[in-house]
Image: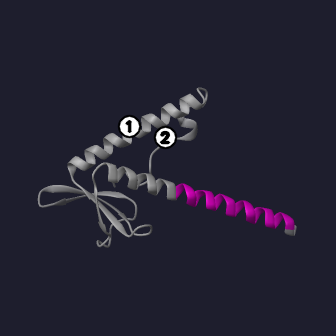
Amino acid sequence: MTAARSLAYFAATLLVLSGCAAIERQQAADAKELLTQAGFRVRLADEPGLPARQLVAQSAAGATVYKYSDPENCNCLYVGGPGEYAELERLRLERMREHEELLRAWSPYAPAAVWGPWNPKGLNLK
């Protein structure tokens, strides 16, 4: 393999990896925006063992508590109850419908299945 070809492969790999990182950062920002809009409270991420950027449900004193930890970006923990979780689900469905409508308006021949639904990573319960 020539040096020019090796350099081209290396550059292409870097481009793909940086694109993936940008998408992941945007998904994390989208998730945090929705959690905030749904009324989740933000506090310092002081609970080790929670999966990073994944919504989890925990039972505490007969009630369910929903938590979303982001130790890498903000070292914060989003905490909500059943009401906040219901609002989060409502907001997610609303955003998914908006995303599909935008895709249809952009190109009626390119269904949402081509681009995939809008769905920030980690907001599905684990």
Circle on res. 78? none
Picture coordinates of residue 11, whole percent (x, y)? 74, 63
Circle on res. 117? 2
Dot 2 or dot 1: first in sequence order is 1
Asked if the magenta segment contains residue 16, the reply would be yes
SS at mark 1?
helix
Q: Quadrant of the rendered structure where residue 41 is?
A: bottom left
Magenta residues, start to end: 4-24
Asked if the magenta segment contains residue 26, the reply would be no
Question: Quick check: 99 above or below 40?
Answer: above
Question: Quick check: 74 above or below 89?
Answer: below
- The residue positioned 28% from the left and 55% from the top of the image is 40
Front-lying residue, 61 or 69: 69
Q: Residues within 10 Å of mark 2 (few under 14, many from 20)?
A: some
Residue 9 in view: yes
Q: Amino acid at mark 1?
A: Glu
- Quarter in which the N terminus is drawn: bottom right
* 107 relative to 68 in the view: left or right: right
Question: Quick check: 83 above or below 96?
Answer: below
Query: Is there CB contact under 8 Å for labels 2 and 1?
Result: no
- The residue positioned 34% from the left and 53% from the top of the image is 35
Residue at the top extreme?
108
* 1 relative to 103 in the view: left or right: right
Q: Amino acid at mark 2?
A: Pro
Helix, strand or loop for the magenta stretch, by majority: helix
* 26 relative to 57 in the view: left or right: right
The residue labelled by disc 1 is 94
Picture coordinates of residue 86, whole percent (x, y)? 26, 44
Q: Quadrant of the rendered structure where residue 122 is?
A: bottom left
